[in-house]
Each structure stands twice: as C-alpha cells, then as structure tokens.
Amino acid sequence: MEMRIVLFGAPGAGKGTQAEQLVEEFGLLHLSTGEVLRKAIREATDLGVKAQAFMDRGDLVPDAVVIGIVKEALGNLPKGKGFVLDGFPRTLNQAEELEGFLRSVGNGITRVISLEVKEEELVNRITARGVSSQAPRVDDKEETIRLRFKAFENQTLPLKRFYADRGLLQEVDGVGSVSSVYQAVRAAATGE
Ligand code: ADP
C-alpha cells in the first residue's frame, strides 16, 4: 500500500517524532520543510539566506520558497516510494500547489493526520525542548513561540477544512507516550 501522508499539527505537536516512527516502519521519505530550512541556514546557502529572517521572528517563509523545496524533493522520489510531509503544507496556497503537483504525476495525498494537542501543553513541550537541547532553536523563545502559534492559527488551521472537504483528514489525540500516540497515527496512516 502506498502512503503519501501529511502530518498536521501546531508547533510542538510532535509531527517530527511521529514522522520518524512512520519512516522506520514503512520506509517512507521524511520531508520536514523546517529541517531543510534550518540546514540551509547552517550551511548559509542562498535558500538559508532567504529564509533566516522569517524563521527567526516566527513568521512563515514565503510560499514560493518552500514550494520549491517540496517539488524538488518529491520530483526526485523513486516511483512508488511513499512519503510523509511534516510542516508542509502550511498555507492554503501551499496545499493547492501540492495537490496540483501530485495530480500532475498521477497521484495524491492518501491521508492527513492531525495531531491534536492543547496550546498549554504545546508551550510546555517547546519550552522543555529549549532547555534540554544543546543547540536550542532561536525561534523557541517565548515571544517567538507566540508568533508561531498565531501564524498556525491564522494561516495553517484553515487547511483542516480543505482536507476534511476532500475526505482525507483524520484527527488523532497527540497527548500520551510516543508509542501510544503512534498506535493511533499508524492506524490512521494504514486506514485500519
Ligand atoms: P514548528 O512546527 O515547531 O514551528 P518547523 O520546523 O516545522 O517547526 O518550522 C519552523 C519554521 O520554519 C516555521 O516557523 C517557519 O518559519 C518555517 N517553515 C517550515 N515549514 C514551512 C512552510 N511549509 N511554510 C512556511 N514556512 C515554513
């Protein structure tokens, strides 16, 4: 069964962690636009230079930039290999571009899994991540976290409707141990 999955959720919801579990079990490509952008910043590439100011202040990077990243990565995927997108799409325009691109190669997203976690818990998780990490993210400062939530609410949350209308959306409770959340993610991904 081919899996072309979007993992959806607020900052700190656990998209990256759950994506890794799916990758391990099903051999999917994991594409995290946030990770690609952070790597570009570390390496000071043109992409990194374009993205850094937006990311540091908690804004979304312009659509054209991230859409370029995703098209390149998915365009190079061997035929039949599935993928999990983590942190993309984040705007309606990105979702439409993704749909158009996948349609042009004869496929589409198979499931959108939304990790549901309340805001209070999200702030705790991100703050804890900042304290325990040896290389804390610049955008994990409290005032920047708030801006990232705003961007999520205003620009990203409307995508749930977009995917619900297409019958692709499945909500999963994102609170609990990594493995208990994964059981639900797995069930959603495989359609069990
Ligand atoms: P989180 O979901 O915890 O905010 P990410 O690593 O997914 O972490 O994203 C970090 C930052 O990278 C975002 O705040 C944004 O600036 C940028 N970014 C990542 N993905 C996208 C995207 N699809 N569209 C626009 N900006 C993005």
Image (tube, rainbow, N blue to C red):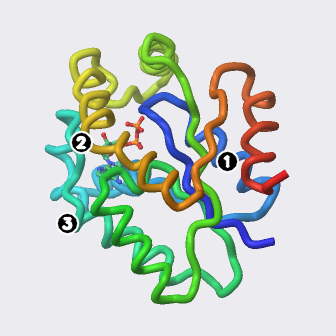
| Amino acid tagged 2 | Met
Mark 3 near mark 1, Cβ–Cβ under 8 Å? no
Does residue 117 sit above or below 111 in this rendering? above
Give the CA distance from mark 1 to mark 2.
23 Å
Give the CA distance from mark 3 to mark 1.
28 Å
Residue 46 has which mark?
3
Does residue 66 sit above or below 75 in this rendering? above
Quadrant including the N terminus:
bottom right
Q: Position of residue 55 (x, y in %)?
A: 24, 42
Mark 1, secondary structure of its residue: helix
Q: Position of residue 177 (x, y in %)?
A: 74, 22
Residue linked to disc 1: 20
Mark 1 near mark 2, Cβ–Cβ under 8 Å? no
Q: Earlier in the sequence, mark 3 or mark 1?
A: 1
Quarter containing ligand 1? top left
Q: Nearer the viewer, mark 3 or mark 2?
A: 2
**Residue sitting at 51 percent across and 44 percent down?**
8
| Amino acid tagged 3 | Asp
- Mark 2 CB lies closer than 8 A to ligand 1: yes
